[in-house]
């Protein structure tokens, strides 16, 4: 599980916190299929190099040798049916899971910070144990290729067609996957890394009371 140096203060007494965030879910209608781009767009040319080539084509550098290879874009995002980023981040903070959470019309999603081998899958397993009765989807993107897998109750249920799910996702979700935007560009990001366990427990307790009051 991805961990951090979150404050390990004593948990507050007298709080009733749900051990399953499914009650805070915001279920959405199923998405329809859509095409997914499989590669990044073209890279803009260097104006100075283009001018030099136009003046003397013989001086054109070998593109493969002259241009340093850009690092491949890589990201992992967990799409949940939890209604708010605050609830998702709070649950992750209580369990010492580091994510950047964002609210969206189809449910809050968590952007993974640890992209080392196997870390996103382990994070999906951990987060899926917090939302036991509804599935979540792990998206992993690298070099313009996207794959998706479904998780529930700490178990991987199998692969999903990424295009099917992405069609119903907000546009900034796809922008994150393909590297045209970053988490720093998004409004309302809630990080579990800066949230104490006491604050997280109070946050979840308050949401649980509101949920019960609305029933």
Image: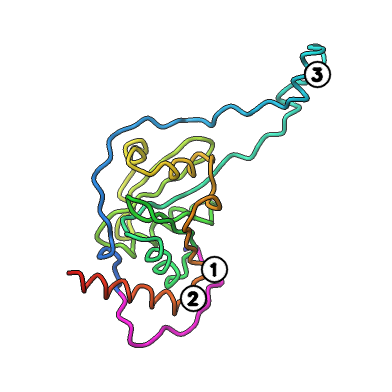
Q: Quadrant of residue 208?
A: bottom left
Say which of marks 2 and 1 sits in front: 2
Residue 155, horizontal then vertical, whole percent? 32, 56
Q: Is residue 54 left or right of residue 171?
A: right
Q: Image check: 213 left or right of 39?
A: left
- x then y, percent, for residue 126: 39, 62
Residue 109 x, y percent position in the rendering = 40, 54
**Tag 1, which secondary structure?**
loop
Residue farthest to the left, as pictured: 215
> What type of secondary structure mainly makes up the magenta span?
loop
Q: Distance between the residues labelled 2 and 1?
A: 11 Å
Q: Mark 1 points at which residue?
A: 4
Q: Are the two marked residues, 2 and 3, in contact with CB atoms closer than 8 angstroms?
A: no
Q: Tag 3 or tag 2, which sits nearer the N-term?
A: 3
Marks 3/1: CA distance? Answer: 50 Å
Q: Which of marks 3 and 1 is nearer the N terminus?
A: 1
Point 32% across, 50% down: residue:
106
Question: What residue is rendered at 44% in x and 50% in y?
Answer: 77
Residue that numbered label 3 is attached to: 52
- Residue to which mark 2 is pinned: 196
- Secondary structure type for disc 2: loop
| Stretch of the chain drawn in magenta | 2-17
Q: Distance between the residues labelled 2 and 3?
A: 57 Å
């Amino acid at each position: 599980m991805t961990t951090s140096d979150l404050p390990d203060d004593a948990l507050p007494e007298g709080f009733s916190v749900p051990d399953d965030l499914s009650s805070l879910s915001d279920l959405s209608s199923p998405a329809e299929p859509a095409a997914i781009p499989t590669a990044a767009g073209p890279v803009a040319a260097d104006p100075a190099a283009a001018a030099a080539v136009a003046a003397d084509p013989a001086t054109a550098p070998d593109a493969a040798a002259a241009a340093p290879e850009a690092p491949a874009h890589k990201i992992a995002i967990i799409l949940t049916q939890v209604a708010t980023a605050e609830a998702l981040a709070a649950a992750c903070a209580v369990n010492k899971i580091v994510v950047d959470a964002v609210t969206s019309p189809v449910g809050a999603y968590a952007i993974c910070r640890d992209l080392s081998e196997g870390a996103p899958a382990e994070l999906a397993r951990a987060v899926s144990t917090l939302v036991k009765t509804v599935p979540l989807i792990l998206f992993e993107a690298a070099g313009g290729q996207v794959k998706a897998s479904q998780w529930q109750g700490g178990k991987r249920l199998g692969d999903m067609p990424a295009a099917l799910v992405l069609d119903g996702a907000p546009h900034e979700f796809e922008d994150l996957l393909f590297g045209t935007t970053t988490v720093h560009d998004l409004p309302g990001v809630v990080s579990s890394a800066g949230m104490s366990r006491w604050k997280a427990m109070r946050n979840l307790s308050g949401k649980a009371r509101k949920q019960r009051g609305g029933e």
